[in-house]
Amino acid sequence: MKLLLDTCVLYPSVMRAVLLGAAGQGLFTPLWSVRILEEWARAARKIGPLGEAQARAEIALVQAQHPKAVVTWPPSLESRLWLPDSHDVHVLAAAVAGHADTIITLNAKDFPRHILAEEGLTRCDPDALLYGFWLDNPDTIDSICQSVLADAQTLSGDDWTMRALLKKARLPRLAKAVAP
């Protein structure tokens, strides 16, 4: 299954770590575009002067881990597509060009299901996706989440609980599943 990851699910570090952990375990094939990665880097400016540099380093690591994830397309593809927010058409173009099954996004309103269906696509939020993966592969997802929790505790110096970390990462259903 090929899933196009929108910027809004790549930028948050915990969400990204769990998603890419699932991809690393073969639960799906991730896709994105150079523009999506560039949006992630620019969004990281909000966290301070070193945010963009840190994001670019993380992007380089992610690209090395998933070298076949970058999708390209001819400009004519974007010109035939439409979404309520024209700034998101590149995401749809990447999904179409990459033969994705689903766009993973938090931005439901700008990716109407009926428009995506015309291109043979669906959309899903990351919490629903990861919860579904947990239902089918609980041990795998539990292991990924434990690794992400350990990294978060080490990097932040805080004593995070699994439930609190995943809820803060906008993954409440997954949080409830892996930390009842």
Image: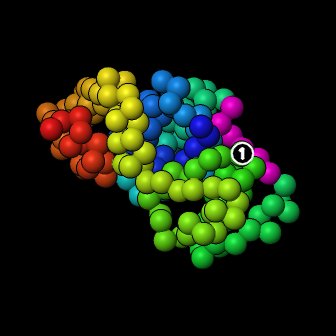
- The answer to whether one can see residue 127 in this image is yes
Q: Which residues are magenta?
A: 68-73
Direction from residue 179 to residue 107 in the image, left or right: right
Mark 1 burial class by Cα count in 10 Å: few <14, some 14-19, many 20+:
many
User: Within the magenta stretch, is there residue 72?
Assistant: yes
Residue at coordinates 53% horizontally, 26% vertically from top-left? 26
Direction from residue 105 to residue 140 in the image, left or right: left
Choose top left, top right, bottom left or bottom right for residue 129: top left
Q: Quadrant of the C terminus?
A: top left
In this rendered view, identify the residue nearer to me: 5 or 177: 177
x and y, in percent, of residue 64 in the image: 61, 27
Direction from residue 150 to residue 94 in the image, left or right: right
Residue at coordinates 35% horizontally, 42% vertically from top-left? 131
The majority secondary structure of the magenta stretch comes to loop
| Vertical relation: 20 (above or below) 81 | above
Choose top left, top right, bottom left or bottom right for residue 29: top right
| Vertical relation: 157 (above or below) 93 | above
| Vertical relation: 175 (above or below) 80 | above
Residue at coordinates 49% horizontally, 42% vertically from top-left? 55
Q: Residue furthest bottom?
A: 84
The secondary element bearing badge 1 is classed as: loop
Q: Quadrant of the N terminus?
A: top right
User: Within the magenta stretch, is there residue 87?
Assistant: no
Reading the image, the residue beneath label 1 is 98
